[in-house]
Amino acid sequence: MLTDDHIWSAIDGQRGRVADLLESLTDEQWQHPSLCEGWTVRDVGAHLTLQQMTLARAVRLVLRNPSHALDVNRIIHESSRRQAAACPRRPSSRRSVPPSDSDATTSA
């Protein structure tokens, strides 16, 4: 039976492989257009980090651009571009797995 720890371990492994791939790219490859119209490879790489965006940050993005509030794709694209601009050229090698349920209960 798959446990949460097994699932998060698989997710962490996949994220690690993506980070390794992104770290291997040249500057030219980072700036190359992706298959997503108007997005560079760097934009897509930054987009992959947006799962860590808090609800408060998402609300602030909408409040900054109220005319885009109903255009989710535009908000996501602009968020990705902001994230790419704020990040170093290479993605962070920091990888984390959420604590297991047993960790949460022992620390409480």
Image (spheres, rainbow, N blue to C red):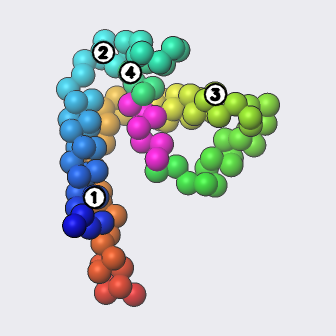
Residue mark closest to the camera, 1 vs 2: 1
Q: Position of residue 66 (x, y in %)?
A: 78, 36
Q: Is residue 65 visible?
A: no
Please name the residue shown 38% across and 21% down the image. 41
Quadrant housing residue 33: top left
Residue 95 within the segment the image draws in magenta: no
Q: Secondary structure at mark 3?
A: helix
Q: Secondary structure at mark 2?
A: helix
Quadrant housing residue 7: bottom left
Marks 3/4 in contact by CB < 8 Å: the verdict is no
Magenta-drawn segment: 45-51
Q: Which residue is mark 4?
A: 41
Q: Quarter of the image containing the N terminus?
A: bottom left
Please name the residue shown 21% across and 38% down the image. 17
* Marks 1/2: CA–CA distance: 31 Å
Q: Amino acid at mark 1?
A: Ile
Above or below — where is 52 with respect to 23? Answer: below
Q: Which mark is residue 7?
A: 1
* Marks 2/4: CA–CA distance: 7 Å
Please name the residue shown 28% across and 58% down the image. 8
| Majority secondary structure of magenta residues | helix
Please name the residue shown 39% across and 87% down the image. 108
Marks 3/2 in contact by CB < 8 Å: the verdict is no
Residue mark closest to the camera, 3 vs 2: 3
Pointer 3: residues within 10 angstroms few (<14), some, or many (20+)?
Answer: few
Q: Which residue is mark 2?
A: 29
Mark sitting earlier along the chain (2/4): 2
Mark sitting earlier along the chain (1/2): 1
Q: Which mark is residue 74?
A: 3
Mark sitting earlier along the chain (3/4): 4
Toward the viewer: 55 or 4?
4
Q: Amino acid at mark 2?
A: Gln
